[in-house]
Amino acid sequence: MKNYKNCQSCGMPLKKDPKGGSTNADGSANKMYCSYCYEHGEFLQPDISANEMQVFVKAQLKKMGFPGFIAGLFTKNIPKLARWSQ
């Protein structure tokens, strides 16, 4: 499996994940998704769409103090990530 720099669901840099990344069903490390999106081999929000993920992540970034314009730039490529291109 390829090692990614960013979560392929929300776009968060994986090095910023407080848990160090997500886990597969067998407990092994998953190098594709962050722990906010994927744990124990399952998506934590299985029914969310790419557009809904963009809105959610943008709101989280704004809560962290990022201006709306910057939050928009950080989230614009979410629909192109691996989870959403399937």
Image (cartoon, helix red, strand yellow):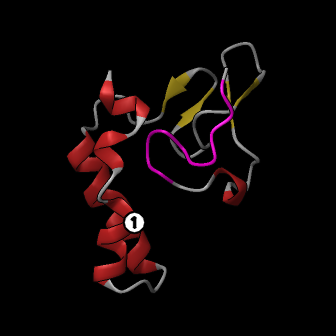
The quarter of the picture where the C terminus appears is top left
Residues 54 and 70: in front is: 70
Q: Quadrant of residue 31?
A: top right
**In the image, residue 4 lies at what x, y percent?**
63, 39
Does 64 sit above or below residue 52? below
- The residue drawn where x is 68% and y is 34% is 3
> Percent x, y for residue 73?
33, 69
Q: Residue at x 62, y 42 (%)?
A: 35
77 or 26, nearer to the observer: 77
Secondary element at tag 1: helix
Residue 10 among magenta residues: yes
Instruction: Give the main secondary structure of the magenta stretch.
Output: loop
* Position of residue 2 measured from the top left corner of the image (x, y, whole percent): 66, 27
Using a 10 Å C-alpha cutoff, classify the residue at mark 1 as few (fewer than 14 neighbours), some (14 to 19) or many (20 or more): some
Task: Tell me if residue 8 comes above or below residue 76 in the rendering.
Answer: above
Q: In this view, does 28 lie above or below 71?
A: above
Residue in the picture at 26% in, 59% down: 55
Q: Is residue 34 left or right of residue 45?
A: right
Residue 55 highlighted magenta (yes or no) = no
Horizontal relation, residue 27 to residue 83: left or right = right
- Locate residue 19, reporting x and y percent: 74, 49
12 relative to 50 in the view: left or right? right
Q: Which amino acid does label 1 sit on?
A: Phe
Q: Mark 1 points at which residue?
A: 74
Residue lying furthest top: 26
Vertical arrangement, residue 6 with respect to residue 60, above or below: above
Magenta range is: 2-11
Q: In which quarter of the image is the N terminus?
A: top right
